[in-house]
Image (cartoon, coloured by chain):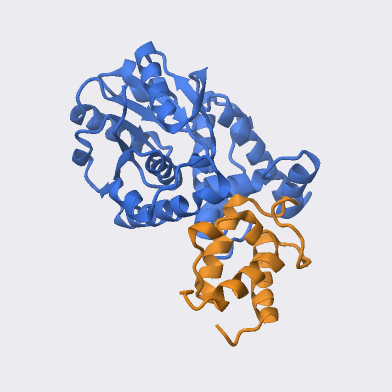
Chain colours: A orange, B blue
Amino acid sequence: MNNTNESEIRAKIRAFILAAIHLPDLADDDNLFESGIVNSLFAVELMTFLEKSFAVEVGPDDLEIANFQSIEAAADFVVRKTAQPSAV
Amino acid sequence: MKFSTIGVVGAGNIGTGVVTDLVLHGLNAVVVDISDAALRKAEDEVLKSVRFAPMFSKTLPRVSREEAARRMTFSRELKDLAGCDMIIENIPEKWEIKRPIYEQLDALMPPGVCFGANTSCLSITRIAAATSRPSEVIGLHMMNPVHLKPTVEVIRGFHTSDKTVELLQALFDQLHKHAIIVNDLPGFVSNRISHVFMNEAAFVLQDQVGTAETIDQIFKQCFGHKMGPLETADLIGLDTVANSLDVLYDSFHDPKYRCCPLLRKLVDAGHLGRKSGRGFHIYPQA
């Protein structure tokens, strides 16, 4: 995980989201939830994807929509979690 | 009455949602399904939903994984429901499946234990007639995701007693839910209207008036709906939607309930919606 840079993380997250929403493209800072692009059910899928793909754990204190509201936010979350020595 | 343990029959989409809601509100659930795979999937889904619930509702109690697991019992045997305070049934919308289950439940459970039929279309009066306790059978139509939906369509069958309505209300008080009570005819209020809506969306797609994406976008972006009709059908499960349309068609003999051939074809192809990864839309699996 430590070798995965942020742009690769963003690309992977973008691919996962685009496969779900059937839109041609999405800006890194587009708010997925406010714009109605996805609903709360997708948030669970996104969190599960992040855990499996990047070996991070979404803990009780991480359960804030702000952490997952855009490609940028989700990538920042992964970078933050992988920087923590205690991350799974 | 304070409810402690609820029997949940059927561990599909909506049954799993019911168990999640019960567990989050401190109740125990005995979950019965004929399929071990369905039971295992239900347990995984409940634990996942309980874990992520605080993100979507700040008012829902926080329940640890261990506590949630402790509150659930899974079984393939109806006899393990003995001791439950109430039964909530969530099996497929097919009379030939429901009827024998109600007959067995009726023989198994003592008088006074109410049966809540979590059906979306079948007549509650007809279900109640399969038991010796028609006054203790009531319809409840919970919506997905159950633990995030505060209101439930509740259906009084022909013989449903006031006491049964009060008991269900007592359970809903524990779940912090509100009931809207309606009378009984197949499809009640919600599905009699919504299924015509989803079915017509499938016809519009079949006629190539728009893609699945554009049809749903019209409803989300123009009407402000949270989900489009095809996404909603995918969430419910296309097999369930087709079954419900068949029930409505058989009940009213009105052609407006005929199932769209494209919808039927997707079901035959195994594209059942979100739960199978593909329906009108494709859902990437994490």
Q: Residue at x 66, y 57 (%)?
A: A66
Q: Name the spot of residue B248 as percent of width and height, x first.
A: 53, 30
x and y, in percent, of residue B195 in the image: 60, 35
Q: Is residue A3 above or below residue B255?
A: below
User: Residue B211 in the image: x percent, y percent?
Assistant: 74, 54
Count of residue discs: 0
Q: Report whether B69 appears left or right of B14.
A: left
- The residue at the far right in this view is B222
Q: Residue at x 31, y 41 (%)?
A: B29
Q: Can the viewer see residue B269 in this picture?
A: no
**In the displayed structure, does residue B114 sit left or right of residue B262?**
left
Q: Where, by quadrant of the figure, is residue B26 drawn?
A: top left
> Of B241 and A47, which appears nearest the observer?
A47
Vertical side of B6 occupied by B64: above or below: below
User: Residue B238's spot in the image, x, y percent?
Assistant: 54, 48
Is any atom of residue B260 visible in this view?
yes
In front here: B77 or B46? Answer: B46
Quadrant where the N terminus of chain A is found in the figure: bottom right
B145 relative position to B206: left or right: left
Q: Is residue B67 left or right of residue A61?
A: left
* Camera-nearest residue between B277 and B167: B167
Please report the residue visible at 36 percent of the width from the left and 25 percent of the height from the top: B127
- State the residue in front, A42 or B223: A42
